[in-house]
Amino acid sequence: MGVNIVLSSPSGAGKTTITKKLSQKYPNIKISISHTTRKPRSNEIDGVDYYFVDKIKFQKLIEEGNFYEYAKIFDNYYGTSKALVKKLQDQNFDVVFDIDWQGTKKLSKFKELNLVKIFILPPNKTELKKRLNKRNQDSKIANDKRLMQYDNDILHWEDYDYIVINNDLEKCFSQIEQIIRNHKKDKMSYI
Ligand code: 5GP
């Protein structure tokens, strides 16, 4: 059985970059690709970044019990598919969940997942603001909403096993590698 790693952070703290970097560097680490009702950004691919579905389809997936958890974030729904995660586990992959604090709380109830929960924080709010503006993929309104959400998001740090500050991407990444390495211990060590 692989390790199941949750990476959460306030929006813009670098979590998606880190998640992708992990799966690119280590073929044994796979990302749990969520379903979402959010519209794809220009650089996003269906089935790679998310499974993009409409609200009707998402509702159907909920009713059929397809999700470990789902949450409404910034007017859109996001959910973690049971079938996709189970498939990865059956193949002995380590799975990374890029999900928010609400999803982490719900996923934690599935004790068999044995989650390692990591919370990534930006060095401070001013830096976060700079990063969100630089990213510039979403509207200013969406970014302002994210900044407002920040104060609420960081309240949930206590639900996590590790807090990592993303001041320097490489340093932050190697701290996360070290955490995963420790949890793999005597298991097949590729990391
Ligand atoms: P974005 O729209 O910027 O890709 O993601 C917004 C937030 O949704 C991020 O904090 C991301 O971690 C979270 N998220 C993505 N997929 C899921 C999911 O399946 N469940 C939950 N609870 N949150 C998710």
Image (spheres, helix red, strand yellow):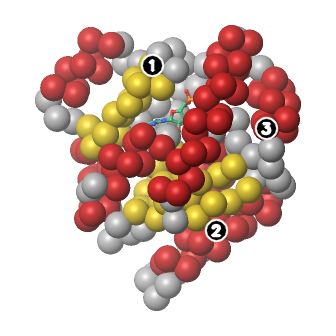
SS at badge 3: helix
At label 2, the amino acid type is Glu
**Residue at which label 3 appears:** 125
Q: Is residue 171 visible?
A: yes
Q: Position of residue 185 (x, y in %)?
A: 50, 84
Residue 109, compared with residue 133, is above or below; it is: below
**Residue at which label 2 appears:** 177
Q: Nearer the viewer, mark 3 or mark 1?
A: 3
Q: For the residues labelled 1 and 2, say whether their Cβ atoms are less than 8 Å apart.
A: no
**Residue at which label 1 appears:** 76
The numbered dot on residue 190 is none
* First-in-chain label (3 vs 1): 1
Q: Is residue 98 left or right of residue 121?
A: left
- Is the residue indicated by label 1 positioned so its CB lies within 8 Å of ligand 1? yes
SS at badge 2: helix
Image quadrant for the N terminus?
A: bottom left
Q: Is residue 131 left or right of residue 155?
A: right
Q: Position of residue 22 (x, y in %)?
A: 61, 57
SS at badge 1: strand
At label 3, the amino acid type is Lys
- The mark total stands at 3
* First-in-chain label (1 vs 2): 1
Image quadrant for the C terminus?
A: bottom right
* Residue that sits furthest to the left in the current view: 64
